[in-house]
Amino acid sequence: MELRDYVRILHKNWIMLVVLLVLGLACGAGYAFMQAPKYVASTQLYVSVRTEGAATGDLVQGTTFARQMVTSYVDVVDTAVVLEPVIEELGLDTNVAALASRVEASAPLNTVLIDISVTDGDAEKAAEITNAIAKSFSDVVQGTLEQPASADAASPVQITVTEPAVPPASPASPNVRMLIILGGLLGLAVGVGLAMLRTLLDTRIHTLHDLEDITDRPMLGGIAYDPEAQKRPLIVHADPRSPRAESFRTLRTNLQFLDVESGPRIFVVTSAGPGEGKSTTTANLAIALAETGARVALIDGDLRLPRVADYMGLEGGVGLTDVLIGRVDVADALQKWGTNELYVLTSGRIPPNPSELLGSTAMDSVLGPLGEYFDYVLIDAPPLLLVTDAAVLGKKTRGVILVAASGKTKKQELTGAVRTLTTAGVNLLGTVVTMLPTKGPDSYGYGSYTYGAKHIAEQAEPELSRAQAKPKRREKVKA
């Protein structure tokens, strides 16, 4: 994936990322406040060798000796010989091992200093224990480890407390700020991981990039999503200045540029599965083409679940099936729709053998005259993966326009539809993506179309009101 794909994924899942980030921050804060505070008190000891009246060379040797011994002294700090007197002196309710786990001793490199720190839940007690350990350690070193040869003589090693321990003003742990930040980072990391996993598991079509992975045929248009599409399927007629209507006009323009070859301009519009918007796309495209002054024929070739008659508000009792069996002439079955040169051939009665009728020579006899008379002939065909009707019709026409619904059509379904057309030798002219969101990372750019809409809507409102009050008369084309 490219960088823009990752950005799109994060943009698309930003709500989940924010929720998990806040949840991580809350968990980090909760964990921090649940921890008991711990205080650390520290002291520093200076180790030296007694060299009264010694020459300069002896002083150097004494310092070198002390530096060598400091490393060994550090390991003595948390031993029983040092800690047991502290426990007895302070009356601590603990043992040597437990106290040793709270004591840390270290020596800075190339120095004669020893740093001792003690961790405790009480600041005063932490300082008290630290000073007691320093005193006990000094006694052990000077009285036991470095015991002088004579009882009256002083120990050659001297331990001096350079910085006594004082009660710390604030606890060393928990680090509330760090835990909150870590919690937020963990929540954000989980959110990013879930967003990536969700994207990898999502096999639906969303963007143009998804189509490019399946077919190299051009994307002819993207139809904006309209939550009221079921109430007003003919958006080009009902609301001509809406973003969704403009998307159908863009599809019309791309289809006109694509159609540069000679011959009848007969196109089949289909989809991989049901409910992807193929029928509304076909009807609106036909209206958009008729707006240019072209003569357009819209044929409902879905002889299993016809929709065109309902969408166009026409009588569907007599239609394509009656023409194919010879009961009615095609000129008598065509119904004029609207004020432009748009004629509709409904499906008629549902036959028991749709594929055989659509693949018959009678269908060729119907398409031949229509292709000669009309500038465009659009056929709404059933889904490719359910029946073979669309592939059968595709062999008789210029090619197929494949409709896919954003967020609904699965990639494997669209791949299967393309494979079906390829196997049947049908020309795939291009694809149309419906139900595209007008906002967000998957939008196709139609959501902000408002140029001139208000002025034209004000002019068209009286005409639309009269048109709704008085339905137009549907005429039949003469033979």
Image (cartoon, grey):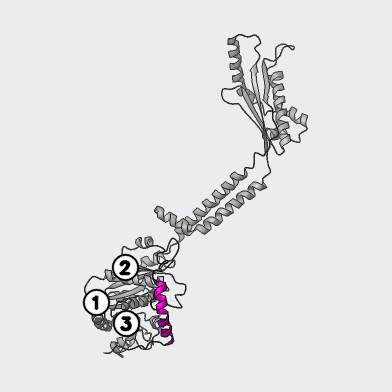
Q: Amino acid at mark 2?
A: Gly
State the residue position of label 2: 430
Q: Amino acid at mark 1?
A: Pro
What separation in Å lies between label 2 and label 3 (alpha carbons)? 27 Å
State which tag comes first along the sequence, 2 or 3.
3
Observer able to see residue 318: yes
Q: Which secondary structure, mark 3?
A: loop
Query: Please, is residue 474 above or below residue 238 in the view?
Result: below
Residue that label 3 marks:
340
Q: Secondary structure at mark 2?
A: strand
Q: Is residue 278 magenta?
A: no
- In this rendering, the answer to whether 98 lies above or below 335 is above
Is residue 304 visible in the rendered structure shown here? no
Which label belongs to residue 264? 1
Q: CA distance from mark 1 to mark 2?
A: 18 Å
User: Label 1 to label 3, Cα distance in Å?
Assistant: 20 Å
* Quarter of the image where one finds residue 391: bottom left
Q: Quadrant of the N terminus?
A: bottom left
In the foreground, 441 or 379: 441
Magenta range is: 450-479
Residue 100 to residue 270: above or below: above
Q: Nearer the viewer, mark 1 or mark 3?
A: 3
Horizontal and vertical percent position of residue 225: 43, 70
Describe residue 139's horizontal placement relative to residue 206 as left or right: right
Earlier in the chain: of badge 1 and badge 2, it is 1
Judge depth for marks 2 and 3 and give the one in front: 3
- What residue is rendered at 68% in x and 35% in y? 168
The tag earlier along the polypeptide, 1 or 3, is 1
